């Protein structure tokens, strides 16, 4: 592990210093672009690091290596600007620009998890880009925390909170052999608030959820308003328990609304990974369950470093099947 520092000047400008040689080595840079817990001084004010600040530091590290590394792999668990993945008006395509910039700086491979839309890799067709799914680890955590969960289609259903997440939920539905439902967002396209059209209502499409456990799968929780509204609507329709799977729990508007929803029985458990910064107090919440991805990332890095294939690591269906068999055996005891 190389010792790297990115000191700041009083103006907020910075540089990167790598304290040892990287010549001829494989360089793996792990960067959490959404760690707002890191701060720096600028004109005597304490500033929280934004995704833009982290991205600039990433480029500084690559620049400090001066092209001497054998290969550079960027492990970016939550993809920088991944939500700005397509153009719907005269607007910037930030994610594509960032990927092209990294490729131009000599990055060999980019490793990310549960990308908002993995098609952004089309912007860098000659550079490695792997979108790793957290499906197996989520299900493993669920069976550990909720040992009485049944994966029978009469007992459990998986639901996408919007049309954009259907592909992710279709995978869960297929490997588990359970039904799939979906909410779609009815928006007011005559109004723009904070750069987007506000949601007027979440409308459900799918089979009845009455007396069923529900797994709601999304890539991230930002403010959490959408997923909490969906939880409320599912409870109104008679859902038994509601489990939320999201790779990234940002909780931009705090945890109080989730506390209230849990108290009202509108959510039962929220599963997010430790791939990004978790705000203070989150781990103590009764409704929160952390999904540990440390071992998986280590395995991916070790495999790439030995020039081996990671294909089997990217397709978890065999491990999921074994997990389901083991879970059924434990329930039968």
Image (spheres, rainbow, N blue to C red):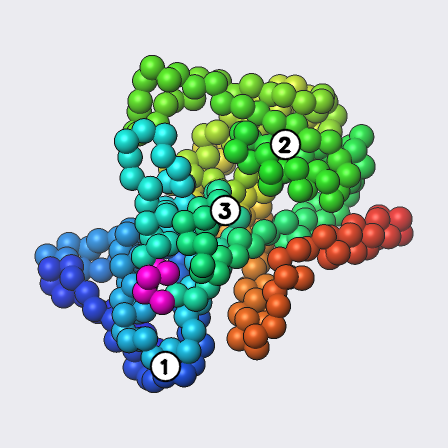
Q: Secondary structure at mark 3?
A: helix
Residue 277 falls left or right of residue 314 = left
Q: Position of residue 83 (x, y in %)?
A: 40, 41
User: What residue is disc 3 on?
Assistant: 118
Q: Residue at x 45, y 77 (%)?
A: 26
**Front-lying residue, 150 or 311:** 311
Q: Main secondary structure of the magenta part?
A: helix
Gap in angstroms between the C-alphas marked 2 and 3: 20 Å
Q: Quadrant of the N terminus?
A: bottom left
Residue 13 vs 65, above or below: the answer is above
Of label 1 and label 3, which has the lower sequence position?
1
User: What residue is disc 2 on?
Assistant: 159
Q: Position of residue 264 (x, y in %)?
A: 56, 28
Query: Which residues are drawn in magenta?
Result: 102-106
Name the front one of labels 1 and 2: 1
Residue 281 vs 25, above or below: the answer is above
Q: Position of residue 331 (x, y in %)?
A: 84, 48
User: What residue is disc 1 on?
Assistant: 22
Q: Residue at x 77, y 39 (%)?
A: 177
Of label 2 and label 3, which has the lower sequence position?
3
**Front-lying residue, 113 or 32:** 113
Find residue 205 and name its label. Answer: none
**Front-lying residue, 29 or 294:** 29
Q: Quadrant of residue 314?
A: bottom right
Q: Residue at x 43, y 81 (%)?
A: 25
Residue 318 visible: yes
Query: Which residue, as the protein is rendered here, is positioned at the far front?
Result: 126
């Amino acid at each position: 592990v190389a010792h790297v520092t990115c000191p700041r000047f009083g103006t907020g400008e910075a540089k990167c210093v790598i304290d040892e040689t990287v010549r001829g080595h494989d360089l793996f840079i792990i960067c959490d672009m959404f760690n707002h817990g890191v701060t720096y001084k600028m004109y005597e004010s304490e500033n929280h690091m934004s995704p833009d600040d982290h991205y600039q530091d990433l480029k500084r590290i690559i620049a400090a290596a001066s092209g001497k590394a054998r290969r550079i792999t960027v492990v970016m668990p939550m993809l920088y600007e991944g939500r700005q993945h397509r153009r719907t008006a005269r607007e910037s395509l930030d994610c594509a620009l960032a990927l092209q910039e990294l490729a131009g700086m000599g990055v060999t491979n980019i490793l990310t998890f549960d990308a908002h839309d993995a098609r952004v890799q089309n912007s860098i067709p000659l550079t490695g880009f792997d979108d790793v799914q957290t499906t197996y680890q989520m299900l493993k955590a669920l069976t550990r925390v909720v040992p009485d969960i049944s994966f029978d289609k009469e007992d459990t259903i998986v639901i996408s909170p919007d049309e954009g997440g259907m592909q992710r939920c279709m995978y869960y539905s297929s490997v588990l052999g359970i039904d799939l439902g979906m909410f779609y967002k009815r928006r007011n396209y005559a109004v723009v608030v904070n750069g987007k059209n506000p949601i007027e209502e979440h409308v459900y499409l799918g089979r009845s959820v009455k007396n069923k456990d529900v797994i709601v799968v999304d890539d991230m929780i930002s403010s959490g308003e959408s997923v909490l509204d969906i939880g409320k609507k599912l409870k109104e329709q008679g859902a038994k328990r509601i489990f939320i799977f999201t790779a990234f729990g940002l909780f931009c508007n705090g945890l109080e609304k989730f506390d209230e929803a849990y108290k009202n029985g509108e959510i039962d458990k929220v599963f997010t990974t430790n791939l990004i910064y978790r705000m203070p107090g989150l781990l103590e919440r009764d409704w929160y369950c952390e999904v540990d991805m440390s071992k998986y990332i280590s395995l991916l890095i070790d495999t790439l470093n030995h020039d081996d294939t990671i294909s089997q690591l990217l397709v978890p269906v065999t491990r999921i099947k074994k997990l389901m068999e083991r879970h059924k055996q434990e329930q039968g005891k």
